[in-house]
Image (spheres, grey):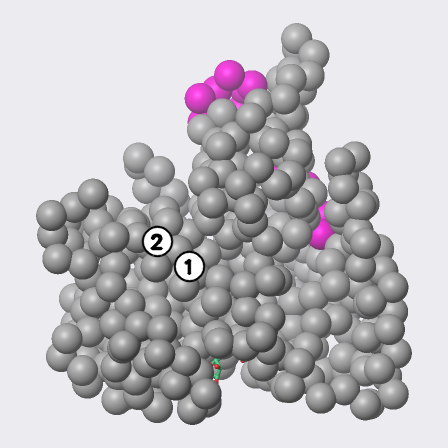
Amino acid sequence: MTTEKPMKVGIIGLGFGATEFIPSLEAQPEIEIYAGADLRPQALAEFEKRYGGKTYKTAEELCADPDVEAVWIATPNHLHAQNAIVAANAGKHINLRKPMGVTMAECAAVQEAVDRSGVKLLAGGQTQGSSPLTHEMRRIITSGELGPLRAMNVVAYTGWMLRPRMPQEVSDADGGGVVWRQAPHQLETTRYLGGGMVRSVRASTGNWRPERPNGTGYYSAMLDFEDGTPATLVYNSYGYFDSMDLTNWLTDKGHGGRAKFRAELLAGNVDEEARKETTRFGGSAEGTIVGGSEGRPWTPGNLGVLIASCESGDIRMSSAGMYIYDNNGMRDVAVHQPGGQGMTLSSEIMELYNAVRHDAPMLHDGRWGWATAEVQWAILESAKQRKEIMLQYQVPVPPGF
Ligand SMILES: NC(=O)c1ccc[n+]([C@@H]2O[C@H](COP(=O)([O-])OP(=O)(O)OC[C@H]3O[C@@H](n4cnc5c(N)ncnc54)[C@H](O)[C@@H]3O)[C@@H](O)[C@H]2O)c1
């Protein structure tokens, strides 16, 4: 508990993404949900009803409110950089959902605005890379008990492409598709476990389904870290096989529903916006999609099945934590996930809060988020050019994280 006044937060973009972090903001006594901005009047009406809060149509209007101390930006990807620059110029601290920008120029412009105004920016949090499981994995790796990290392999098969989507979400050109939208879960996790510094990327991407013709739905990527550690990342979002079926405690029960939705998309008779609306802030299905009651078994989800190989052992997630395979055999180590196995966000809220109020150091600052966005950009670029892309904006995990 704190005796300080809560930080007054404004939320820009009250869509589905916002419903993932709003419960965590509500639960945090250090935070007051104070203002909301969205183009959709029904979201603003619900916001006023729920919080008695101030509402605005645009990021500019919300950022002109002198009482807003920090903003949480959850607008579509192609608006992230411009919203963040507006906020920085208005002196607001920022929690920017991934990615920081969808070009290196956008990331540079956000960083420049943040440096100039002196606000704190949290970029690149809110992924599986911030979960207690990933933190515990890093603790074991850096303790050296299994010897040095030698390789990481991650495989995700999900139905990401078969959820109701706005056009920009499934268009690479607008910051959509799996590389811009989903790769941060694998990249934040592997960059954090591997120390941050990726030297180069070689990748191939796939866009092979007619119901989603404009966006990348598949990638295979090989990251070569500065110290020589390789990470291979695979993501297939087309919703046939599900990597949940690779666990021995859960299977995917969504096969039938996905086949039906795919057929409807192919027939062109789905009102995707109306369906998506139900999942947004104030919608009839709000909060039903984000998993996470305490004690629920771990699911591969957006991250996929990850195996971290050290010189003298391997680590992978188990239903309640992680399996460690070493020279003594195999053991299951429980990891407590406060708030369950969904995205647990209080650590990220406190990362920004402590940076703002106590000048505490951050892992997920602008340069970290920019480095992750660079790997996303490099996956697409490598696939296009069919060659290895050398990186230049990487930063290491700072001491203490
Ligand atoms: N971490 C995750 O797993 C995860 C999950 C879902 C969404 N997200 C992120 O959340 C963001 C939004 O995605 P979403 O699924 O919530 O989409 P969405 O369409 O449901 O939400 C976007 C919201 O922004 C509003 N908006 C659009 N343009 C605006 C503008 N100019 N000014 C103010 N408001 C505006 C829309 O009306 C909508 O309410 C994306 O960056 C996405 O990557 C992340």
Q: Is residue 286 visible?
A: yes
Q: Is residue 98 visible?
A: no
Q: Residue at x 30, y 35 (%)?
A: 400
Q: Residues within 10 Å of mark 1 (few under 14, many from 20)?
A: few
Q: Is residue 212 magenta?
A: no
Q: Residue furthest top?
A: 328
Position of 70 compared to 99: left or right? Answer: left
- 1 and 2 marks in contact (CB < 8 Å): yes
Q: Which image quarter holds the N terminus?
A: top left
Position of 33 compared to 19: left or right? Answer: left
Of residues 331 and 43, the one nearer the viewer is: 43
Residue 194 in picture, x, y percent from top left:
51, 39
Q: Mark 1 belongs to which amino acid?
A: Pro
Q: Which mark is residue 27?
A: 2
Look at the numbered disc 2 and give the secondary structure of its residue: helix
Residue 95 in picture, x, y percent from top left:
34, 64
Q: Which image quarter holds the C terminus?
A: top left
Residue 259 in picture, x, y percent from top left:
87, 69
